[in-house]
Image: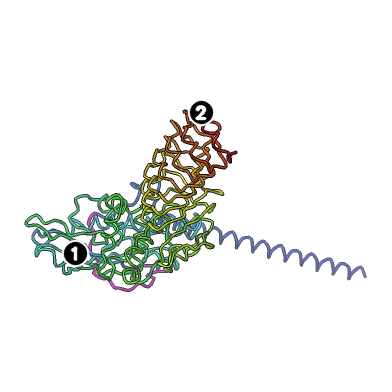
Amino acid sequence: ASVDEKKRKRRRVNTCRTLCIAITVIVIIIGIAILIGNLVAGNRLDTEAPSTSSPSSRPVPAPTPTLDPSFEKSEAPTTFGTVTFTTPYEIFIQDGLLESIPESDYTPSLVESMDKLTYDVLLNIEKEKHSEDRRRLIAVLLPTKIVQLTNISCPDDAFEGDLCQRVEAQVSLSDAEDSWIEFRTTLELAIEVGRLQFNLNEVDPFCPAEVVDSLWTLPTPTISPAPVGRPSWEPSVFPSAVPSDVPSSLPTAAPSLLPTPFPLFDFLVQNSFDNGTALSDPSSPQTMALTWLLQDRRLATNYSPQRILQRYSMATFYYATQGDEWLANDLWLSNGSECDWFNKASFLGACNRNQELVNLELDQNNIAGSLPPEMGLLSSLERLTLRGGPVSFLSGTIPSELGLLTNLRVFYIRANRLYGTLPPELGMWTELEELDVSRNRITGQLFSEIGNFRHVRFFDVSANSLSGPIPSELGNMKKCRKLFFEENNFFSPIPSEVGHLTLLQELKGGYNVLESLPSELGRLTSAT
């Protein structure tokens, strides 16, 4: 029995020794794998694009890029984890043929401009899809290359000495996986909305080449007057797809000009409130909205000019108020009717029978940013309610262009962080019935144009920083039932004309410096 006991003990010892050896081997293998992984990750980081902390830290392209004679139009990955593809676009050089401008005079600037654009596009796409750690593993292999330049026909309005070329730009991504398709599409769209030309202006303001995009117009010739208007041609670059996600900080640009004769850019400039200044800024909400509209190839055939302005205005509002962060934004910026986009006015209906927006209610939906002037284009709007919260709030000023909403009956914008004055243009709201701008940071005087609010039943400007006298025109609001102007800095007597408000039921004016109370208040027998 003792012999058997010893054998069993020996077996247990051998078993334990075997397990210990196996565990040790596994630990060693895991350690070696981790070490190799760190070395590979280090090599990837070495080839990654530079930090965005300073634009000047981006790599500078070769002084004179040469055309690659081995260029092939294959877009398959060239090596494991690396994708190489080409992005075509077109350039115009005034008098380029007459002056025999060498390619070395403009190709370096084109390459550097493309480097900046590809890097910005990558950051925006990866910001939407991946964490910061994941982003560091994906990189654009800079500098990009110009692999082919081909002379093409210039527009009919150009002169014989002008030069037009098609540029084939080669871009390589490492560890791009499936993101490279969206990257390429977004890059092509960004070029067409003017982002590449924007970079080119920064890199070389004197570059003889101009990128042909949706903002491009034929330059005025130096030898004879140029025809007025946009060129009669259309750039031939059309991306094969449109990205599903639209980055919030960089406009994911749009196909070039519409395939219909409808001149969208000129149309929006003509209907803008700043002569198109905002539309010339590639990062503005207005340009983002233009970008989105240009993605609809059937825009001019599906919508009337008024509907196009309506969609443009609502898209501008979406971008200006950080629509991606709203609590609910169902169907916004979809191809469907804007009357179906998320709206808390479902009971009343967002649009009338003519598909004109009449009710826009997005109370407590985390609306942030600021109100764009383009909201003044919603000429049929009757109700606009944008109560702030629960976490995000509107800031900035109330645009004077809102005064153009002459059909407006209800305007609620309480509990936000709006500042500045109440524009006197709001006095054009002659159909107004309810106004609530309370609990903001509005300053200045209450405009005398409130005398035009003859249909107002509810008027609340409380909890702001309004000052000066209370206008006597207040007495024209004879249908008013509730009048609140407490918690301001008014320094004046209550005007005697308030006695005309015989239907008034509630009057609150505390926490102001009211010098005297008129005897006419005695007429307000229903007020409390």
What label sits on residue 206 in the rendered view?
none
Relative depth, front residue between 200 and 340 = 340
Quadrant where the C terminus is found in the figure = top right
Q: Is residue 334 left or right of residue 232?
A: right
Please determine whether, in this image, residue 466 is positioned above or below residue 268: above
Give residue 231's mark.
1
Quarter of image, res 138: bottom left
Examine the image and state in which quarter residue 212 appears.
Answer: bottom left
Q: Which residue lies at the image location 13% right of the left edge and 61% below the top edge? A: 227
**Can residue 419 be seen at all in this image of the molecule?**
yes
Q: Secondary structure at mark 1?
A: loop
Is 176 one of the magenta-colored residues? no
Q: In whole angstroms, how far apart are the C-alphas of marks 2 and 1?
A: 64 Å
**Secondary structure mainly formed by the magenta segment:** loop
Q: Which residue is mark 2?
A: 514
Q: Position of residue 396 (x, y in %)?
A: 43, 43
The N terminus: image quadrant: bottom right
Residue sitting farthest toward the left: 223
* Residue drawn at the location 8% of the way across and 60% of the way down: 98
Which residue is at the front of the view, 458 or 287? 458
Question: Furthest-top residue in view?
Answer: 515
Question: Disc 2 on helix, strand or loop?
Answer: loop
Query: Is residue 73 shown in magenta?
Result: yes
Amino acid bearing label 2: Leu
> Residue 78 placed where, x, y %?
37, 70
Q: Which residues are magenta?
A: 63-83
Q: Amino acid at mark 1?
A: Pro
Q: Nearer the viewer, residue 34 or 119?
A: 119
Q: Residues within 10 Å of mark 1 (few under 14, many from 20)?
A: some
Number of callouts in the render?
2
Inspect this view and state whether residue 51 appears: no
Residue 299: % across, % down: 34, 68
